[in-house]
């Protein structure tokens, strides 16, 4: 398990999901998926902080080789999507996109569709690629808006 560090800003925490209205019929690991997808997109686009790179170099490598999935990636970080994992630009984007609720809308429109809840989405590479494409589009739109 990765050692803990005091977190300045937490955008999301899996525990808040599986202690809430999480379906009793699903394993709690499913509460980690959307967080892991976001982390995976950050890794694939090399938008992480030096701290994250130092602390999770093995996991970054394994994720890029598709040896671990999104749920495992998020579990390694105790399901925390936090400020310390991202570089400055990514934190600005994450505040706009993730904390601003746009990611959730995209997640629903791209992945949830006919599923009962966000927790019923499968952790597979096809789903990851579909939402990653949308996230990359949003990132490019955001950079144009902010002249970043």
Image: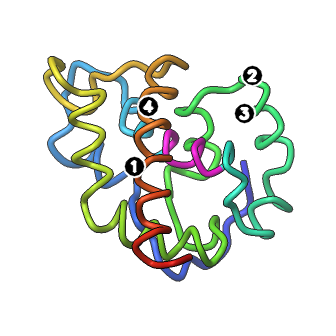
| Residue 77 coordinates in the image, percent (x, y) | 61, 52
| Residue 128 coordinates in the image, percent (x, y) | 49, 28
Residue 14, which numbered label?
Answer: 1
Residue 67, which numbered label?
Answer: 2
Say which residue appears at 50% left-offset and 50% top-offset: 79
Instruction: Give the spatial CA distance, label 4 vs label 1.
Output: 9 Å
Q: Are marks 3 and 1 in contact (CB under 8 Å)?
A: no
Q: Does the magenta portion include 37?
A: yes
Q: Quadrant of residue 63?
A: top right
Mark in front: 2 vs 4: 2
Instruction: Give the spatial CA distance, label 1 vs label 2.
Output: 22 Å
Q: Does the magenta portion include 20?
A: no
Instruction: Give the spatial CA distance, label 2 vs label 4.
Output: 17 Å
Magenta segment, which residues? Answer: 36-42
Say which residue appears at 69% left-offset and 61% top-offset: 48
Report the residue marked by disc 3. Answer: 63
Q: In this view of the protein, which residue sits in the foreground, 38 or 133?
A: 133
Instruction: Give the spatial CA distance, label 3 vs label 4.
Output: 17 Å
- Vertical position of residue 35 compared to residue 24: above or below: below
Q: Are marks 2 and 3 in contact (CB under 8 Å)?
A: yes
- Vertical position of residue 4 compared to residue 37: above or below: below
Q: Secondary structure at mark 2?
A: loop
Instruction: Give the spatial CA distance, label 2 vs label 3.
Output: 6 Å
């Amino acid at each position: 398990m990765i050692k803990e560090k005091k977190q300045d800003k937490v955008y999301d925490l899996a525990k808040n999901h599986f202690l809430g209205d999480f379906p009793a019929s699903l394993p709690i690991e499913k509460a980690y998926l959307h967080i892991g997808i976001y982390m995976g997109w950050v890794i694939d686009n090399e938008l992480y902080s030096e701290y994250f790179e130092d602390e999770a170099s093995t996991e970054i490598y394994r994720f890029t080789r598709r040896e671990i999935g999104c749920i495992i990636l998020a579990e390694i970080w105790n399901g925390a999507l936090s400020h310390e994992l991202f570089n400055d630009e990514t934190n600005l984007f994450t505040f706009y996109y993730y904390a601003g609720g746009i990611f959730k809308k995209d997640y629903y429109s791209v992945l949830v569709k006919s599923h009962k809840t966000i927790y019923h989405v499968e952790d597979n590479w096809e789903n990851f690629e579909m939402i990653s494409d949308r996230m990359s589009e949003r990132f490019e739109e955001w950079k144009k808006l902010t002249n970043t």
